[in-house]
Image (cartoon, rainbow, N blue to C red):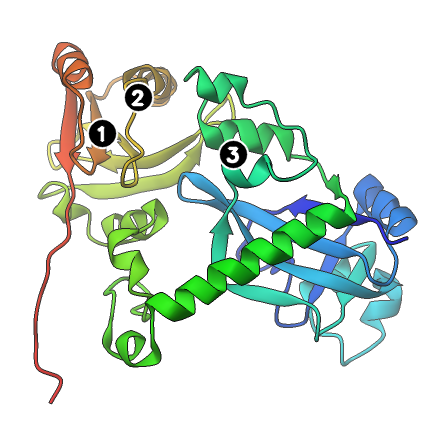
Amino acid sequence: MPINYLIPYVPLKGHVDPDFKEMAYGEGGRRAITLKKNVSAGSYMFFHTKIGSDKYITGYICLNKIMTGKEARKIPAINCDGKFDDFLFIGNRNKSRLLKKPILFNQRLANKLSLNINFEAFNNKEKTELRVIASATRAHRQLTNADVEVLLSEISKYEINLKYENSDDVQKYLYFYSESDKIIPLSDVYKIHESDIQKLLRKYPALIEKGLSVIDHEKVLPDGDRLDLLLEGKDGSIVVAELKGPNCLTDSIPTQLASYVRDIQREYPKRQIRKMIICDGKVSPKLQKACEALAIEIVVYGMKLECFKLV
Protein backbone atom coordinates (compact mmCIF):
# COMPACT_ATOMS: atom_id res chain seq x y z
CA MET A 1 0.00 0.00 0.00
CA PRO A 2 1.48 3.43 -0.97
CA ILE A 3 2.77 5.63 1.86
CA ASN A 4 1.93 9.33 1.62
CA TYR A 5 3.80 12.38 2.90
CA LEU A 6 3.33 15.98 3.97
CA ILE A 7 6.49 17.86 2.91
CA PRO A 8 7.69 21.36 3.87
CA TYR A 9 9.62 23.57 1.48
CA VAL A 10 11.04 27.09 1.24
CA PRO A 11 10.74 28.88 -2.13
CA LEU A 12 14.23 29.74 -3.34
CA LYS A 13 15.27 32.04 -6.16
CA GLY A 14 17.05 30.09 -8.88
CA HIS A 15 15.94 26.69 -7.59
CA VAL A 16 12.29 25.73 -8.13
CA ASP A 17 11.50 22.62 -6.10
CA PRO A 18 8.84 21.29 -6.02
CA ASP A 19 8.26 22.16 -9.66
CA PHE A 20 4.54 22.13 -10.37
CA LYS A 21 5.02 22.78 -14.08
CA GLU A 22 6.99 19.57 -14.40
CA MET A 23 5.10 17.91 -11.51
CA ALA A 24 8.40 16.79 -10.00
CA TYR A 25 10.20 17.01 -6.68
CA GLY A 26 13.90 16.49 -5.99
CA GLU A 27 15.35 15.41 -2.67
CA GLY A 28 18.82 14.58 -1.35
CA GLY A 29 20.54 13.03 1.63
CA ARG A 30 18.77 10.99 4.29
CA ARG A 31 15.36 12.40 3.45
CA ALA A 32 15.74 11.20 -0.12
CA ILE A 33 16.71 7.70 1.01
CA THR A 34 13.72 7.52 3.39
CA LEU A 35 11.31 8.76 0.72
CA LYS A 36 12.63 6.34 -1.90
CA LYS A 37 12.31 3.45 0.55
CA ASN A 38 8.74 4.24 1.57
CA VAL A 39 6.90 5.72 -1.42
CA SER A 40 5.73 4.00 -4.57
CA ALA A 41 3.47 4.68 -7.55
CA GLY A 42 0.23 6.15 -6.25
CA SER A 43 1.78 7.78 -3.18
CA TYR A 44 0.66 11.35 -2.53
CA MET A 45 3.05 14.15 -1.57
CA PHE A 46 1.40 17.32 -0.28
CA PHE A 47 3.64 20.39 -0.08
CA HIS A 48 3.33 23.26 2.40
CA THR A 49 5.21 26.51 2.95
CA LYS A 50 5.06 29.77 4.88
CA ILE A 51 3.26 32.65 3.19
CA GLY A 52 3.12 35.83 5.28
CA SER A 53 2.34 34.81 8.86
CA ASP A 54 0.64 31.49 8.07
CA LYS A 55 1.29 28.04 6.65
CA TYR A 56 -0.38 27.01 3.39
CA ILE A 57 -0.66 23.82 1.38
CA THR A 58 0.17 24.88 -2.16
CA GLY A 59 -0.02 21.71 -4.23
CA TYR A 60 0.50 17.98 -4.42
CA ILE A 61 1.83 15.25 -6.69
CA CYS A 62 0.60 11.70 -7.03
CA LEU A 63 3.76 9.71 -7.62
CA ASN A 64 4.27 8.03 -10.97
CA LYS A 65 7.96 7.05 -10.86
CA ILE A 66 11.27 7.60 -9.09
CA MET A 67 14.59 8.25 -10.79
CA THR A 68 18.08 8.97 -9.56
CA GLY A 69 19.28 12.47 -10.30
CA LYS A 70 22.04 10.97 -12.41
CA GLU A 71 19.47 9.18 -14.60
CA ALA A 72 17.27 12.28 -14.84
CA ARG A 73 20.17 14.50 -15.96
CA LYS A 74 20.73 12.24 -18.97
CA ILE A 75 17.19 12.85 -20.26
CA PRO A 76 16.88 16.20 -22.12
CA ALA A 77 13.08 16.19 -21.78
CA ILE A 78 13.36 16.41 -17.98
CA ASN A 79 13.79 20.11 -17.35
CA CYS A 80 13.49 20.78 -13.63
CA ASP A 81 15.88 21.79 -10.85
CA GLY A 82 15.05 18.66 -8.88
CA LYS A 83 17.10 16.53 -11.28
CA PHE A 84 20.25 17.89 -9.61
CA ASP A 85 19.28 16.20 -6.32
CA ASP A 86 19.97 12.58 -5.39
CA PHE A 87 16.51 11.39 -6.38
CA LEU A 88 13.72 12.84 -8.50
CA PHE A 89 10.09 11.99 -7.71
CA ILE A 90 7.89 12.47 -10.76
CA GLY A 91 4.11 12.83 -10.47
CA ASN A 92 1.25 11.68 -12.62
CA ARG A 93 0.20 14.84 -14.46
CA ASN A 94 -3.47 13.86 -14.42
CA LYS A 95 -3.48 13.37 -10.65
CA SER A 96 -1.06 16.10 -9.54
CA ARG A 97 -1.63 19.82 -9.37
CA LEU A 98 -0.65 23.25 -8.18
CA LEU A 99 -3.60 24.74 -6.29
CA LYS A 100 -5.18 27.79 -7.89
CA LYS A 101 -5.28 29.25 -4.42
CA PRO A 102 -3.33 27.73 -1.49
CA ILE A 103 -5.40 26.39 1.40
CA LEU A 104 -4.69 27.57 4.93
CA PHE A 105 -2.87 24.97 7.01
CA ASN A 106 -4.17 25.90 10.45
CA GLN A 107 -5.34 24.20 13.62
CA ARG A 108 -8.75 23.41 12.16
CA LEU A 109 -7.22 21.50 9.25
CA ALA A 110 -4.44 19.92 11.32
CA ASN A 111 -6.97 18.50 13.78
CA LYS A 112 -8.65 16.62 10.93
CA LEU A 113 -5.39 14.79 10.18
CA SER A 114 -3.50 12.07 12.04
CA LEU A 115 -0.51 14.34 12.80
CA ASN A 116 -1.35 14.68 16.52
CA ILE A 117 -0.05 18.25 16.70
CA ASN A 118 -0.25 19.64 20.23
CA PHE A 119 -1.79 23.14 20.11
CA GLU A 120 -1.71 23.74 23.87
CA ALA A 121 0.99 26.43 23.58
CA PHE A 122 -1.07 28.24 20.93
CA ASN A 123 -4.32 27.95 22.88
CA ASN A 124 -2.50 29.38 25.93
CA LYS A 125 -1.14 32.22 23.75
CA GLU A 126 2.44 31.16 24.44
CA LYS A 127 3.23 30.53 20.76
CA THR A 128 1.67 31.54 17.47
CA GLU A 129 -0.27 29.03 15.43
CA LEU A 130 2.42 29.27 12.75
CA ARG A 131 5.22 28.36 15.17
CA VAL A 132 3.33 25.37 16.57
CA ILE A 133 2.59 23.97 13.11
CA ALA A 134 6.07 24.77 11.77
CA SER A 135 7.75 22.96 14.68
CA ALA A 136 5.56 19.88 14.22
CA THR A 137 5.99 19.70 10.45
CA ARG A 138 9.62 20.74 9.98
CA ALA A 139 10.43 17.16 9.00
CA HIS A 140 8.56 15.08 6.43
CA ARG A 141 5.40 13.68 8.04
CA GLN A 142 3.65 10.52 6.93
CA LEU A 143 -0.03 10.75 6.01
CA THR A 144 -2.58 7.96 6.10
CA ASN A 145 -4.90 7.25 3.18
CA ALA A 146 -7.67 8.78 5.29
CA ASP A 147 -5.55 11.95 5.60
CA VAL A 148 -5.21 12.08 1.83
CA GLU A 149 -8.99 11.84 1.44
CA VAL A 150 -9.44 14.66 3.96
CA LEU A 151 -7.00 16.93 2.13
CA LEU A 152 -8.41 16.22 -1.32
CA SER A 153 -11.91 16.85 0.03
CA GLU A 154 -10.86 20.13 1.66
CA ILE A 155 -9.23 21.29 -1.58
CA SER A 156 -12.30 20.34 -3.60
CA LYS A 157 -14.74 22.14 -1.26
CA TYR A 158 -12.51 25.20 -1.13
CA GLU A 159 -12.27 25.52 -4.90
CA ILE A 160 -16.01 24.93 -5.39
CA ASN A 161 -16.62 27.87 -3.04
CA LEU A 162 -14.14 29.99 -4.97
CA LYS A 163 -15.99 29.31 -8.22
CA TYR A 164 -19.25 30.30 -6.57
CA GLU A 165 -17.89 33.49 -5.04
CA ASN A 166 -15.82 34.58 -8.02
CA SER A 167 -17.51 34.21 -11.36
CA ASP A 168 -15.44 34.71 -14.49
CA ASP A 169 -17.01 38.07 -15.31
CA VAL A 170 -16.11 39.44 -11.86
CA GLN A 171 -12.53 38.14 -11.88
CA LYS A 172 -11.97 39.54 -15.36
CA TYR A 173 -12.18 43.13 -14.21
CA LEU A 174 -10.92 43.00 -10.65
CA TYR A 175 -7.27 44.00 -10.21
CA PHE A 176 -4.90 44.29 -7.28
CA TYR A 177 -2.09 46.70 -8.10
CA SER A 178 1.05 45.16 -6.64
CA GLU A 179 4.47 44.10 -7.90
CA SER A 180 2.95 41.41 -10.11
CA ASP A 181 -0.16 43.40 -11.12
CA LYS A 182 -2.17 40.17 -11.33
CA ILE A 183 -5.89 39.62 -11.07
CA ILE A 184 -6.87 38.18 -7.70
CA PRO A 185 -10.16 36.59 -6.57
CA LEU A 186 -12.83 38.84 -5.11
CA SER A 187 -12.49 37.18 -1.71
CA ASP A 188 -8.92 38.46 -1.41
CA VAL A 189 -10.08 42.07 -1.35
CA TYR A 190 -11.30 41.53 2.20
CA LYS A 191 -9.02 38.56 2.99
CA ILE A 192 -5.77 40.11 1.81
CA HIS A 193 -2.67 38.21 2.90
CA GLU A 194 0.17 39.67 4.95
CA SER A 195 2.59 38.69 2.16
CA ASP A 196 0.68 40.91 -0.30
CA ILE A 197 0.89 43.86 2.08
CA GLN A 198 4.60 43.24 2.64
CA LYS A 199 5.30 43.21 -1.11
CA LEU A 200 3.57 46.56 -1.48
CA LEU A 201 5.42 48.13 1.46
CA ARG A 202 8.76 46.82 0.24
CA LYS A 203 8.13 48.45 -3.11
CA TYR A 204 6.73 51.67 -1.63
CA PRO A 205 8.15 52.11 1.92
CA ALA A 206 7.15 55.79 1.81
CA LEU A 207 3.58 54.57 2.37
CA ILE A 208 4.69 53.91 5.95
CA GLU A 209 6.66 57.11 6.38
CA LYS A 210 8.25 59.57 3.99
CA GLY A 211 11.95 58.98 3.55
CA LEU A 212 11.94 55.36 4.70
CA SER A 213 14.03 52.83 2.78
CA VAL A 214 14.16 49.04 3.05
CA ILE A 215 17.32 47.44 4.41
CA ASP A 216 16.02 43.87 4.57
CA HIS A 217 12.84 41.81 4.80
CA GLU A 218 12.13 38.41 6.36
CA LYS A 219 15.53 38.85 8.03
CA VAL A 220 16.61 35.66 9.80
CA LEU A 221 17.68 36.41 13.37
CA PRO A 222 20.08 34.34 15.53
CA ASP A 223 17.26 32.37 17.20
CA GLY A 224 15.71 31.47 13.85
CA ASP A 225 12.84 33.98 14.01
CA ARG A 226 12.23 36.25 11.03
CA LEU A 227 11.88 40.02 11.19
CA ASP A 228 9.28 41.21 8.70
CA LEU A 229 10.85 44.55 7.77
CA LEU A 230 14.12 46.25 8.68
CA LEU A 231 13.97 49.87 7.56
CA GLU A 232 16.07 53.04 7.69
CA GLY A 233 14.59 56.46 8.35
CA LYS A 234 15.68 59.60 6.57
CA ASP A 235 17.33 60.67 9.86
CA GLY A 236 19.51 57.52 9.85
CA SER A 237 17.50 55.70 12.51
CA ILE A 238 16.90 51.95 12.18
CA VAL A 239 13.25 50.86 12.24
CA VAL A 240 12.41 47.35 13.44
CA ALA A 241 8.95 46.79 11.99
CA GLU A 242 6.66 43.83 12.65
CA LEU A 243 3.85 43.49 10.13
CA LYS A 244 0.60 41.77 11.10
CA GLY A 245 -2.05 40.70 8.61
CA PRO A 246 -5.76 41.39 9.12
CA ASN A 247 -7.08 40.08 12.45
CA CYS A 248 -3.61 38.77 13.41
CA LEU A 249 -2.61 41.35 16.02
CA THR A 250 -2.10 40.00 19.58
CA ASP A 251 -1.17 41.60 22.90
CA SER A 252 2.08 39.61 22.99
CA ILE A 253 3.70 41.51 20.13
CA PRO A 254 5.71 43.94 22.36
CA THR A 255 7.60 40.95 23.79
CA GLN A 256 8.25 39.69 20.27
CA LEU A 257 9.52 43.11 19.18
CA ALA A 258 11.78 43.42 22.24
CA SER A 259 13.53 40.19 21.27
CA TYR A 260 14.04 41.44 17.71
CA VAL A 261 15.35 44.80 18.89
CA ARG A 262 18.04 43.18 21.07
CA ASP A 263 19.41 41.35 18.02
CA ILE A 264 19.29 44.44 15.80
CA GLN A 265 21.00 46.61 18.46
CA ARG A 266 23.96 44.24 18.40
CA GLU A 267 24.18 44.69 14.64
CA TYR A 268 23.75 48.49 14.74
CA PRO A 269 25.23 49.51 18.15
CA LYS A 270 25.65 53.20 17.30
CA ARG A 271 22.29 53.79 15.63
CA GLN A 272 18.98 54.89 17.10
CA ILE A 273 16.57 51.94 17.04
CA ARG A 274 12.85 52.54 16.59
CA LYS A 275 10.16 49.94 17.19
CA MET A 276 7.10 49.76 14.95
CA ILE A 277 3.96 47.67 14.52
CA ILE A 278 2.18 47.79 11.16
CA CYS A 279 -1.36 46.46 11.50
CA ASP A 280 -5.04 46.76 10.58
CA GLY A 281 -5.78 49.08 13.49
CA LYS A 282 -7.61 46.58 15.70
CA VAL A 283 -5.51 47.48 18.75
CA SER A 284 -6.74 46.48 22.21
CA PRO A 285 -6.58 49.06 25.05
CA LYS A 286 -4.01 46.82 26.79
CA LEU A 287 -1.76 46.75 23.73
CA GLN A 288 -2.13 50.48 23.14
CA LYS A 289 -0.99 51.24 26.72
CA ALA A 290 1.97 48.85 26.35
CA CYS A 291 3.02 50.48 23.09
CA GLU A 292 2.83 53.96 24.62
CA ALA A 293 4.93 52.86 27.61
CA LEU A 294 7.55 51.11 25.43
CA ALA A 295 7.71 53.79 22.70
CA ILE A 296 6.40 51.41 20.04
CA GLU A 297 4.98 53.23 17.04
CA ILE A 298 1.74 51.90 15.54
CA VAL A 299 1.12 52.35 11.82
CA VAL A 300 -2.28 51.34 10.44
CA TYR A 301 -2.91 50.19 6.87
CA GLY A 302 -6.19 50.20 4.99
CA MET A 303 -7.57 49.76 1.51
CA LYS A 304 -8.40 52.50 -0.93
CA LEU A 305 -11.38 52.03 -3.22
CA GLU A 306 -11.17 53.55 -6.68
CA CYS A 307 -13.89 53.43 -9.33
CA PHE A 308 -13.15 53.88 -13.02
CA LYS A 309 -14.85 53.25 -16.34
CA LEU A 310 -13.71 50.27 -18.38
CA VAL A 311 -15.34 51.58 -21.58
Q: Nearer the viewer, residue 88 or 117?
A: 117
Q: Earlier in the sequence, mark 3 or mark 2?
A: 3
Q: Residues within 10 Å of mark 1 (few under 14, many from 20)?
A: many
| Left or right: 220 in relation to 118 | left
Point out which mark residue 253 bears: 2
Q: Nearer the viewer, residue 179 or 35?
A: 35
Residue matched to label 1: 277
Tag 1 and tag 2, C-beta contact below 8 Å = yes
Residue drawn at point x = 33 percent, y = 45 percent: 194
Give the mark toward the camera: 3 or 2. Answer: 3
Q: Is residue 25 above or below residue 308?
A: above
Q: Is residue 40 above or below residue 93?
A: above
Point out which mark residue 238 bears: none
Which SS class for mark 1?
strand
| Alpha carbons under labels 3 and 2: distance apart | 21 Å
Q: Residues within 10 Å of mark 2 (few under 14, many from 20)?
A: some
Point out residue 66 in the picture as x, y percentages from the top left corner: 86, 62
Point out residue 109 in the picture as x, y percentages from the top left corner: 55, 41
Point out residue 23 in the picture as x, y percentages from the top left corner: 68, 68
Residue drawn at point x = 70 percent, y = 46 percent: 147
Q: Residues within 10 Å of mark 3 (few under 14, many from 20)?
A: some
Point out which mark residue 107 bears: 3
Name the amino acid, label 2: Ile
